[in-house]
Image (spheres, rainbow, N blue to C red):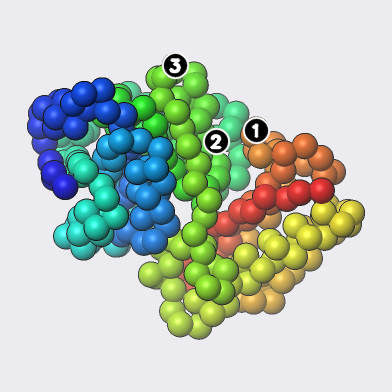
Amino acid sequence: MQIIREASQLPSALIAMGDGGKSLALVPTMGALHSGHLKLITEASRVADRVAATIFVNPLQFGANEDFDRYPRQEEKDAAMLEEAGCDLLWLPQPAEFYPAGFATTVSVKGVSDRWEGEARPGHFDGVATVVAKLLCAVRPDIALFGEKDFQQLAVIRRMALDLQLGIEVLGVPTVRDEDGLALSSRNAYLSPEERSNAVELPRALNEAAEAISSGLLVSDALAAAKARLTRAGFSRIDYVALVNALTLEPLEQAGGPMRLIAAALIGRTRLIDNIAVGL
Ligand code: PAF
């Protein structure tokens, strides 16, 4: 696996990889990799001839009181994991080069960004859309892969790629979960053992609500039961538990169409998000 840091090294690395018209998949990450990221790499190798990844803890997507400074950083370990998983090229953009003095452009995706994470974390999706647009423009992959764990992020990136007519396919990859069902996340590392054992109530509450909605219970009752379960488990703040249209992220009061249950809640100092599909 070739590792590059400077953007000026990118064109020649990409030309070498694309030799003979090979297709390229890109997996953008913020590092602190876990099996969920490795599944993105495996899936990328399945859908394209060559795989590139980026690791960049993007300051633009963190709010002033969020965890940018304490976000786990483990570059060497991440690089070894990516190589082992079959990644061909790793680009580690350098902050000062990526966002040079005077950088003044924001990519903002209206509508799909507005609610849920967008409301709880003002500016977050502008930061995500801006960094992903820059990464996609620099690497120009055929396909870019993102985890379904950040379901709204995936919808924002899909909309952005479509609107900017990037000609890049955006592929969502199902969430990888621990044995007990907790979605893998780099932020799980913040959980104390007690918080970790209670955190599993988040996917359990979502599964219970999804089953209830599928079997015809009122959506509002199912959501209220899920919130009560989270409160009992020690979640100190519930930002949202909602049934939404899976494409527009608009809230649904009644079941129908493509649906997703989404949730965000705080346990200790750690904010967890999760989502699952709902069928009828
Ligand atoms: O999901 C992430 O890790 C980040 O939001 C992303 C897409 C790499 C942009 O910084």
Q: Quadrant of residue 221?
A: bottom right
**Residue under pointer 3:** 165
**Residue under pointer 2:** 155
Name the amino acid, label 1: Thr
Judged by depth in the image, the label closer to the viewer, 1 or 3, is 3
Left or right of 134: which side holds 167? right
Q: Nearer the viewer, residue 2 or 182?
A: 2
Q: Are marks 2 and 1 in contact (CB under 8 Å)?
A: yes
What residue is at 50 percent from the left and 76 percent from the top? Answer: 196
Q: Nearer the viewer, residue 74 or 22?
A: 22
Local packing at callout 1 (Cα closer than 10 Å; few below 14, some 14-19, many 20+) is some
User: Which is more N-terminal, label 1 or label 2?
Assistant: 2
Residue farthest along the front direction in this orientation: 20
Image location (x, y in percent) of residue 3: 13, 45
**Residue under pointer 1:** 248
Name the amino acid, label 3: Gln
Image location (x, y in percent) of residue 220: 83, 54
Name the amino acid, label 2: Ala
Query: Can residue 204 be seen by looking at this rendering?
Result: yes
